[in-house]
Image: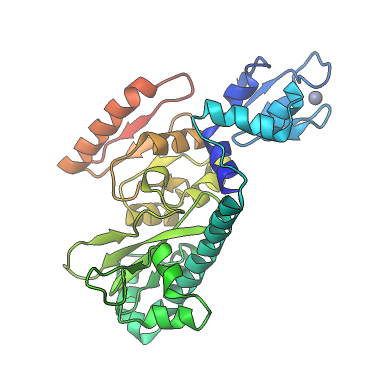
Amino acid sequence: PNFLDELRARTPIAAVVSRRVKLARSGRHWKGNCPFHNEKSPSFYVYEDGYHCFGCGAHGDAIAFVMQSQGAGFMEAVEQLAAEAGMEVPKQTPAAAEAERRRLDLHGVLDTAASAYQRRLHLPEGRAGLDYLRARGLTDDTIARFGLGWSGDGRGGLQAELARQDIPPEMLLEAGLLRATEDGRPPRELFYNRVMFPIRDRRGRCISFGGRILGDGQPKYVNGPETSLFAKRHTLYALDLAREAARAGQPVLAVEGYMDVIALHQAGFTAATAPLGTALTEEQLEELWRLSPMPTLCFDGDAAGARAAARAASLVLPMLAPQRSLKLATLP
Ligand code: ZN
């Protein structure tokens, strides 16, 4: 399922369909004459993640389109689209099935940790974190919507709490919540004395965390390490929420950090998203274009923000195409 998700995400469905059907832009979507029934006026629509014919009811995603239009089998269609996306189809071996099951387990581990962090924010130990978030102007509603939490002091509390729910330390290591030590001592909690920001995938499942320290400690933000679930260069913060909002017609914005995203959502810009402490990558641009043909980059008004915007602009130049462009907003 993970592989198929990734394949669907990396496959621009309008491009696949347009090899068979002449498509024209229709508002936020595309339309054309249905290839599956005879018609003179177009009732075949292509959306971000699928197609639908209002004439004959044909319906599906990119994989279904290849199957239906070429009479291909499921695996054949998957192989073809994967080759075009430069992806290798995983072998269906017992080892691969085991790896997939572990990834599903890891989502469960991370979701459980997110609930624990969230609960702690409202305990006396999380008070300073909650005060900080409120002082930054966040409402309780916003704090809940983003699942913000408190890490605890890192002295084994999280480990103990999750152990009681039958989650062993090895799973916490694999989920990126514990850090191995080199001198043979037991692994330690990666996040302590930090406000916790769950990072979710495009389907809203927790894949990692960012943590912000209170006060002037360094580093200000820490992100979880790369794991089998979390690849920084493919991930945009709040993408799950932004997808919904973009579909409802909200302008798609990419800003610099977690707090920018959250503040914008609270102010009604619910399709705001951000890379995770790195410069914007090609993969993240592709994600943005899946939401909108012309997203807006809005980085900070300082010199670093201006440099980041210039870097993004030169990255995007060779990728520009009709329906794939970018707007830059500058803040005085
Ligand atoms: Zn049709």
Q: In the image, is 241 to the left or to the right of 76?
A: left
Colouring scheme applied when the structure was drawn: rainbow
Quadrant of the rendered structure where residue 208 is? bottom left
Q: Nearer the viewer, residue 10 or 252?
A: 10
Image location of residue 19, percent across then percent down = 63, 16
* Residue occupying the point 82% across, 26% down: 55
Image location of residue 252, percent across then percent down = 45, 40
* Residue occupying the point 37% across, 56% down: 263
Is residue 86 at all visible to an observer of this figure? yes
Q: Nearer the viewer, residue 285 or 269?
A: 285
Q: In the image, is 298 to the left or to the right of 247?
A: left
Image location of residue 61, percent across then percent down = 67, 35
Is residue 27 at all visible to an observer of this figure? no
Q: Nearer the viewer, residue 121 or 102?
A: 102
Ligand 1's quadrant is top right
Q: In the image, is 150 to the left or to the right of 77?
A: left
Image location of residue 247, percent across then percent down = 57, 41
Q: In the image, is 184 to the left or to the right of 101?
A: left
Task: Point out the residue furthest to the front here.
Answer: 94
* Residue occupying the point 26% across, 60% down: 221
The image shows a total of numbered marks equal to 0
The C terminus: image quadrant: top left
* Residue occupying the point 55% across, 64% down: 105
